Amino acid sequence: MNRQMKPQVRSKLIKSLLISSAMALSLSSYALAGGGDGVGETVSMEEYQALKSEVETMRAELDEMRALIKAQQQTQPTSSRQTIPVSSTTPTVNVAAQPPVSAPEPQVTKEEFQKLKKEVRKINRTAKSAEEWKNTNSTVHLAGYASAGYASNDGGDGRFNQAQFAPIFHYQYKDRVLLEAELEFEAAEDGTTDVGMEYLTIDLLLNDYATLIAGKFISPLGQFRQNGHPSWINKLPSAPSGFGHDGAAPSGEVGLQLRGAIPMGESDMRANYALYVGNGPSLETVVEGGQTEIHGIGTEGFTADENGGKVVGGRVGFLPLPKLELGLSGATGDVAIDGESNRAYRAMGADFSYRFKKYDFRGEYIEQEAKALSSSIVPEAFNVSTWYVQGSRKFAKNFEGVLRYSDYDSPHPDEQQKQWAIGLNYLFAPQVIAKIAYEVNDGLNGTINDENRWLFQLAYGF
């Protein structure tokens, strides 16, 4: 290895030595004097110590450079280390007798120094904020939907019949607990506001395949009630016959529910499930012509359980293809008229949904029955059922056409209805939809269920 130092290398080392010495001396004087602004302001001891630490580091580097230069000089002839040209415009420098070099203090004002410190603090705050957001334990989310509507019966006057707001609140702690709740605010015919709670549950996220839910939840029987009833998801301004509140399809339940996915191994098939136990429905009675009748099966989700018997049930969905789902639902338990003995209750249903390119097809059948009880003031059984099929297709930019048929069967003739509904939608955005539809209704003559009508609705999901 050649231990002789080339002139160019020595020149660079000497030049670095001179500049570093000047900086070290000037930084020391700057720290003691309070800055280079010439006004004698002082800095804090912390700032001074920081600058002092930098100076000491630079001095250590200078000592190493001096030792390296000295070692190189000892291996060369005397003549070669008498003078070293630093540059073409710099006088020769005698290394052995190099005098202390003075340099002008750096022109850094107190204001510039404080500005730099502020920028550092700002960066630190930004980094800390980003880290806190990244590692947050709790997440709050607001969703929901709203809708406004207009209805006009054939031969009658139209009216603006809907102003609804349904906020949905989500609060999640880590990947362990989720609280979700939906409230409903709706303008009533008399100008007051109807307020309701569609559901409120505390969800324990057990694992990737199971969530335990406690509270009031939408009935998992069938598909429309739990997935399709929000106005911005429903493709028509109205629900299918029998799928509204007080219809044949159960609305809600208070109790416990376990729902999630079913592992299917390497198969392309997927499956999901929802199992529940709850207080169950109630039998609603009415007196007409001096005779008591069962008006309907109430399924709004009650915290009372007067008959003391629980209802268990659920739904299982199978997806043999990614866009095809087949579902089976069922429930069993006890139900009673207030003050009477329990009678058996059951519910059953089936549903499907299929998407193909721009087409969407779906349908559902649901039935509820309260068995006969000879000792009751209403000994007969009570059975309600309904079903619908629906198809839609998107076309011409944001337009969508919809056709639906539904059939509601009830022991009360004035509630029975067969309905055709045809609609045209325009999607301003995926969650903003304007709907116009016409219903052809076939029910008992002289009742509202026999009147055809026009419907208009603007719905917004957020």
Image (spheres, grey):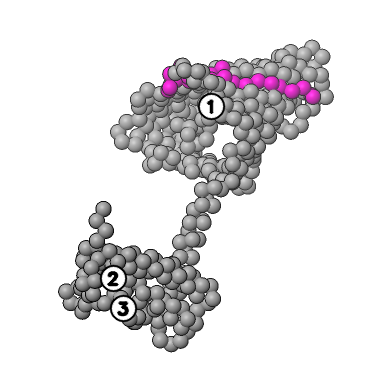
Residue 224 has which mark? 1
Secondary structure, mark 1, is helix
Residue at left 28%, top 67%? 73
User: Is 366 a magenta residue?
Assistant: no
- The residue tagged 2 is 14
Specify the farthest residue to the left.
88
In terms of depth relative to the viewer, which is nearer, 167 or 34? 34
Residue at left 43%, top 32%? 437
* Residue 195 in the figure: left or right of residue 127: right
Q: Are marks 3 and 1 in contact (CB under 8 Å)?
A: no
Above or below, 456 against 376 in this view is below
Secondary structure, mark 2, is helix
User: What are the residue bounds of the magenta stretch?
Assistant: 307-328
* Residue 426 in the figure: left or right of residue 334: left
Point out the frontmost of discs 1 and 2: 2
Residue 403: where, in percent of width, then height?
42, 25
Residue at left 31%, top 36%? 397
Residue 176: where, in percent of width, then height?
62, 37
Circle 1 packing at 10 Å, graded few (<14), some (14-19), many (20+), is many
- The residue tagged 3 is 98
